[in-house]
Image (cartoon, helix red, strand yellow):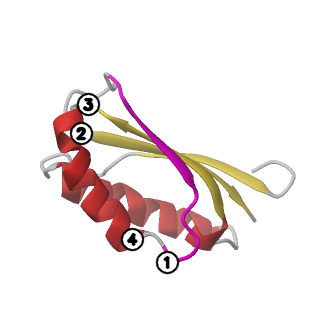
Amino acid sequence: MHNDTIYYTSVPENLDLDAEAQTADALAAIDKLLDRLGSDKRKILDATIFLVDMADFVAMNRAWDAWVSPGFAPVRCTVQAQLMNPKYRVEIKIIAAK
């Protein structure tokens, strides 16, 4: 955190899950961190989602849409990237206000 702005990158903990479940897992970790810092997902300003396989976009989006607060969706972009752990299907980077 810097100047009441939170910077965080979330990865799934359970790497045996499919892309939708890994996304939900990473989003749950974001919820926990934001809560611990006195913020919540409605205060996310920007999100970047990294997917290993763009074929997982629809599955990732189902988890995202189920998670995001209606009326508070942050700016978001999704890119295809090779991630550091070959079992990661998704990685999510956020910037949030405190």
Disc 2, SS: loop
Q: How far apart are marks 4 and 1 (CA)?
A: 9 Å
Q: In this view, does 66 lie above or below 14?
A: below
Question: Could you tell which of marks 2 and 3 lies nearer the N-terminus?
Answer: 3
Q: Name the residue under label 1.
A: 70
Question: Would residue 14 be seen by someone viewing this image from the given angle?
Answer: no
Q: Mark 3 points at which residue?
A: 52
Query: Could you tell whether 64 is left or right of 17 in the image?
Result: right
Disc 3, SS: loop
Q: How crowded is mark 2: few (under 14 residues within 10 Å), some or many (20 or more)?
A: many
Q: How far apart are marks 2 and 1 (CA)?
A: 25 Å
Whole-percent x and y of residue 61?
30, 56
| Dots 4, 2 in contact, CB < 8 A | no
Whole-percent x and y of residue 35?
59, 73
Question: Could you tell which of marks 3 and 4 lies nearer the N-terminus?
Answer: 3
Mark 1 or 3, closer to the camera:
1
Question: Which residue in the rendered view is the most extreme toward the front?
Answer: 71
Disc 4, SS: helix
Question: Could you tell which of marks 2 and 1 lies nearer the N-terminus?
Answer: 1
Residue type (three-letter) at the residue carrying disc 2: Arg
Front one among 46 and 40? 46
The stretch in magenta equals: 69-81
Whole-percent x and y of residue 34?
60, 66
| Dots 1, 3 in contact, CB < 8 A | no
Mark 4 or 2, closer to the camera:
4
Q: Name the residue under label 4.
A: 67
Question: Could you tell which of marks 4 and 2 lies nearer the N-terminus?
Answer: 4
Whole-percent x and y of residue 42?
61, 72
Residue type (three-letter) at the residue carrying disc 4: Trp
Q: How far apart are marks 2 and 3 (CA)?
A: 5 Å
